[in-house]
Amino acid sequence: MTKLIESASDWAKTIDPTFKPRYSGLSAAALQIAEMTPQGRKAEIKAFSHQYCFPQMNLEKSASLYLMLRILFDLPREVPRDRAKVFGGWMHPSIGEVTPFQMSWPVTVNPETDTAAVQRFQGYSGKGYDAFGEYEYFETNFPLRSKEKLKKLVAE
């Protein structure tokens, strides 16, 4: 499973505007995680997070997990700032704004076309990404995307 998450995307390279990303593995990785038991999901995300995200960070592998979590969970586009939590130093367009927090950024899912648009990587600042903490926050507050939707979803 770890290999599937690792190869799910190359989002971090999109900071270069000439780079053509591939996101074909995101939905497959999210579906495989969704098909696990809740305990299996937690164990997989925790192991991956510990190996690649926190305390030491591999940017490309962490970025794949960051995107995959936004495909796996049916996140609202925006949430009130007092409900939003941040688990890493991703350069996020909501930082410094007074508007609602864009929880699903950089992923925008269009349920009518079964597509997920991914915005370009903006950068990262700081230490590791607490992906397991983010997973637990999402698990507590938001539903998983249905397996039927994950099977159809195409990330671009």
Image (spheres, grey):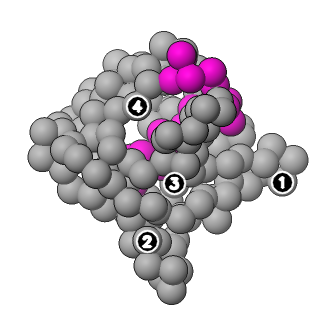
Residues packed near mark 4 inside 10 Å, few (<14), some (14 to 19) or many (20 plus): some
83 vs 62, nearest the viewer:
83
Measured as percent of width and height from the top left, residue 138 is found at 49, 24
Q: Nearer the viewer, mark 2 or mark 1?
A: 2
**Labels 3 and 1 touching (C-beta < 8 A):** no
123 vs 41, nearest the viewer:
123
Q: Amino acid at mark 3?
A: Leu
Residues packed near mark 3 inside 10 Å, few (<14), some (14 to 19) or many (20 plus): many
Q: Residue 89 bears which disc, if any? A: none
**Labels 2 and 3 touching (C-beta < 8 A):** no
Q: Amino acid at mark 2?
A: Ile
Give the Cα distance between marks 2 and 3: 19 Å
Give the Cα distance between marks 3 and 4: 21 Å
First of labels 2, 3 by sequence position: 2
Look at 33% across and 44% down and name the residue there.
Answer: 89
Q: Nearer the viewer, mark 3 or mark 4?
A: 4
Q: Is residue 140 left or right of residue 142?
A: left
Measured as percent of width and height from the top left, residue 70 is found at 54, 41
- Asked whether the viewer can see residue 83, the reply is yes
Q: Nearer the viewer, mark 1 or mark 4?
A: 4
Give the Cα distance between marks 1 and 4: 29 Å
Residue occupied by mark 3:
26
Residue occupied by mark 2:
15
First of labels 3, 1 by sequence position: 3
Note whether 58 is above or below 100 in the view shown.
below
Region in magenta: 64-84
Report if residue 72 lies within the magenta region.
yes
Measured as percent of width and height from the top left, residue 54 is found at 18, 39
Local secondary structure at mark 1: loop
Q: Please identify the residue farthest to the right as the structure is shown.
A: 112
